[in-house]
Each structure stands twice: as C-alpha cells, then as structure tokens.
Image (cartoon, rainbow, N blue to C red):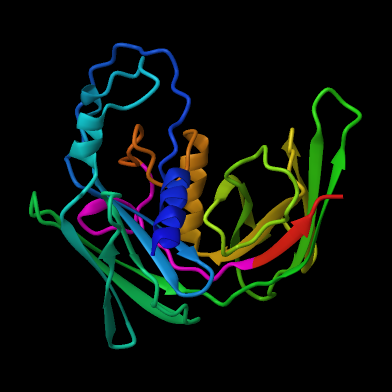
Amino acid sequence: MKNLQLKIAVILSSLLFLNCRPKSIAIDLPQAEKKLVISSQVIPGSIMLVTLSRSMDTRGFNVNEDSISQDILNQLLVDSGIVTISYNGISDTLFSSPGIPGVFLSVSTPQILNTTYNLYAKDYNTGMEVTSSAYMLPQVSLNNATATIDTNGVFDITTINYDFTDPQGEDNWYMVNFYAQKDSNSAGGGFDLNENNNVLKETVILTDKDFSTANYSDSYQLSDWNQDTVVVSISNISKGYYDYLSARLRSGGLFTSISREPVNHPTNIIGGYGFFTTHKPSIKIVRVN
C-alpha cells in the first residue's frame, strides 16, 4: 500500500503541476459559477484515477506568487466525498487516497473495450455533485518506438520515433505520452512501470485527418534528456477529449491545473467542469541509444 500511495502522489503531481503564469493585468470579469472539477486518468492494468476539486474565484489567487498556499489548496481539493464508476451493471466505489485530498482511485476496475463507463461524484462538504459518461474505445497499438540521443549541440536532444496503424474508415484521435523517472538525474537501471517514480513529461495529441496513410509514423524531440530509458504510450481517445486537451495545451497546461480551472474549456461533466475519460493505453519501454 505504501508503494501505491507513493505512485499516486507522483501521478497527482503530474496531473496538478503548476503552469508558468504571465504578468498580472487588472481585468474585471464576471466569475464563473463555483462547481466541482473532474480530471481522470487511466493507468494500464485495472487502475482508474479521478481527481475531484472545486473551482474558485480567480480573485482568490495571487498570480505573482510562485506557489499556492495551503489554505487555498484546502479550499480547492475535496477531502470528503464519494466517487463511483459504473459499467455493465457493476458499480465500483473509488477509495480516497490517504493523505492526498481530492484523489480517488480504483485498483480493480477492468478496462473493457467498447464499454460505457458512468461517473458519479459528490462533495460532502458543499453538497455539489456531478455525473458523466465515457466510452472505452478500441485500443490502437504502437508498432515500434525507438529513441536516439544527439550530444553534439549545446543541449542534448533525444529524438523519439514511433509508428502505429490508424484504423481506416473512421475518424480517430490520439494522445501520445512520454514518461520519465521522477529523479531525472538517476543513472542507469532502466525503467520499470511497476515503480513509483514514473512521471508524465510531455503530451502530444493527433488527429488522423492529418494522416496521409494508414501507417502513421512521427518523431518527437525531448531536450536535455539524461536518462537511459523513456516510456512511450498511445491512447485512442474521443473527439471530445481531444478538443479538451487541445484547449488545455493552448492555455499552457493539461488536466486539472490548480491555478487555471477549465471553466471555458470543452467538458462532458454534467453540473461541473473538467473531463471524464476512459481509454486503454498501448505502451512501449524504449532504451535511449
């Protein structure tokens, strides 16, 4: 359980990382209605994770600060509530992670393709509740992935090449993630998906409207990469989630960023903000050469 809690903490740090914020400008705008904010993640195996927080009047933040106070975090994160995920007549109640408010997860919810998953969440302190649903699309597998490093420049550049086969006769959208170890200065030893120090580093989203052939290949460069392994994952995602991620990327961050609640972004949450998604990632562990 200790290792699981540590893994959850690392995942949460990936989901809730803070964005660089520009110099403040005095603008008086009407504030969005306070609601619950949902962010979800699917981890290979049977783990589904949902973060539950509250939106907040942006005037409660001092954007000149580099961090958010514990008092504000306590107002944002839901420390008392319930989250359930239902599918095929079964309902799983996610458990609240000890010591990490706002994080609810299940370690036994199966990832069943072509299945609708229904979300229900309630904040006991405010009485606010939300619902949503997401469809687990067919998995699309990575065919190959390689990583090579170029040390001739001012910064080391690691180029990751990957390819997969895009199903034909339908529109598809994809999320490609690149993971590293939490300690980027650690030497050797490879990469173990069962360890607790895996952290999301970069995300790319794709639409097959930009593909010229069914066999799609691409490359991505990671600057100053000093590890000997990288994990590449691809997920077949819905158009709605693609649009949500696109909006988040344009605004400078993904998932539920504490300092930028997604009140103006696409959402599939009834009664709240954010996005509930289900997908089954295909993963390859790649050694950097």
In the shown orientation, is residue 180 left or right of residue 244? right
Q: Give the quadrant of residue 76.
A: top left
Q: Give the quadrant of residue 86.
A: bottom left
Please tell me whether residue 153 is drawn above or below residue 77 in the rendered image.
above
In the shown orientation, is residue 136 left or right of residue 156? left
- Which residue does the image show at 73% across and 54% down from the upper left? 189
- Which residue does the image show at 29% across and 11% down from the upper left? 26
- Residue 243: x, y in percent? 48, 51
The answer to which of 70 and 259 lies nearer the viewer is 70
Residue 55 visible: no
Residue 213 visible: yes
Q: How many marks?
A: 0
The answer to which of 265 and 35 lies nearer the viewer is 35
- Residue 14: x, y in percent? 48, 45
Magenta stretch bounds: 265-282
Please tell me whether residue 59 is drawn above or below residue 84 in the rendered image.
above
Residue 281 on the magenta span:
yes
In the shown orientation, is residue 245 left or right of residue 16? right
- Which residue does the image show at 40% across and 59% down from the upper left? 2
Which quarter of the rendering shows the N terminus?
Answer: bottom left
Furthest-right residue in this view: 152
